[in-house]
Image: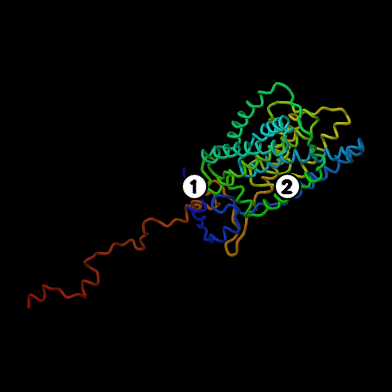
Amino acid sequence: MAYDDAGRTAPPETSSGVPAAVLENIFDDPVHGEPGRDRIAVHVLWEFVLLAGLVAMAWLLWREDADALRGGALKTLLVDVAALGLLTLAAGLSLRAGAVNLAIGPVALAAALHFAEQGDRGMREALLPALAVAAAAGLALALAVVVLHVPGWAASLAGAAGVIVYLERRTGPVTVQGDYDPRRSALYFFVGFAAVAVLGGLFAAMKPVRRLIGRFRPVADPARRRGAVAATVTALALVGSTVLAMLGGVLIAANGDGQVAPGTGLDWTVLAVGTVMLAGTSAYGRRGGIFGTLFAVCLVVVFLAWTVPYGWTVSRWALGGAVLGVGLLVTRLVETFGRPRPAATAGTGPVRPPRDGALSGGWTMTPAPEPADAWPSVLPVRQHDTPVEAWEAPRWDSEPRRWDADDR
């Protein structure tokens, strides 16, 4: 199946006289996208809000139970951050690529059950088969999305249903086998997650990288293919998100209370997708912040730790739904204030955003009609009303007459 690679088959719109090279510099998606560059200020402001909320929640936890932020409890908290962080990175990677992977929760729970059963055989023997299966499942999902060019949420939901069939074969909790304790490397897990989250946000903030990752995001007809490059990047994002979800499930099992309860795993999907949207990643893809993922994951985990001293039992469904609801508001905030402002180029004036009757590049299809009275008259207006006889024209008197020459 062929892909419509807009960057190869069609040059940027230049009907306004703006050179194609200039369009490449001022447009995030010069052929089909909105004119101008994405604005990052809204993400910075929202991340300050997240940081303030995290500091306030950490202070509340310290005031209620100071022991939760020291010693072994702190190590458990850091591993919890890394585990949820891996799921959030999985959701964020696929979401920014424009094909959200809703199977990350069931994949994580399946990996947790597998590790609980096979952990006594050693880490390598337990992880390698799970890694191979996760990569194969992610590749199958990626092929379904990019070859058929169908929405990622629909294809991944079908994949999640297949994983849930495997999960429903368990009728009771599975005790974790083996003696691996991730709390011994809690600081390394946390620093690793933080580094990946922040560095990924920094790289994705660069225009070429952001444009590359978000090429699968629809800009006109959602069913239109976005090109081979977009398909390749989206496929890699789906495979990577599935592998990250598997690793997050292993940490969840290893850092748990000794048992892994079977279920659908979709509650983990809702929580992870809600957390990454709370972090400032747009539900439409492409746009996202830098520190938002780190702050949002820490805020959710610290909030769950804060509820423990009160004896509250917070359902992941309830927390995930609440976080997802706030994330939808953040998406609207990001899409409203993060979209490009009208860009200006030297000698061409401002480039206005597209409106009704305009092409996707922002250039008008037809010029605006002139006022009716500005059109010239169809027929010329006579200057003299008196008709002139053709036989009395001066040119007839000045020319010689042939019949006079014959009479001589």
**Amino acid type, callout 1:** Asp
Protein image colouring: rainbow
> Residue 283: horizontal and vertical position, in percent?
66, 40
Residue at image position (51%, 38%) is 148
Location of residue 108 by image quarter? top right
Q: Residue beneath label 2, please?
A: 197
Residue at image position (81%, 30%) is 257
**Amino acid type, callout 2:** Ala
> Residue 160: horizontal and vertical position, in percent?
63, 31
Q: Camera-side residue: 143 or 407?
A: 143
Camera-nearest label, 1 or 2: 2
* Residue 4, label in figure: 1
Distance between mark 1 and mark 2 Cα atoms: 32 Å
Q: Camera-side residue: 188 or 305?
A: 188
Residue at image position (29%, 62%) is 387
Q: Name above or below for residue 394 compared with residue 17.
A: below
Residue at image position (24%, 64%) is 389
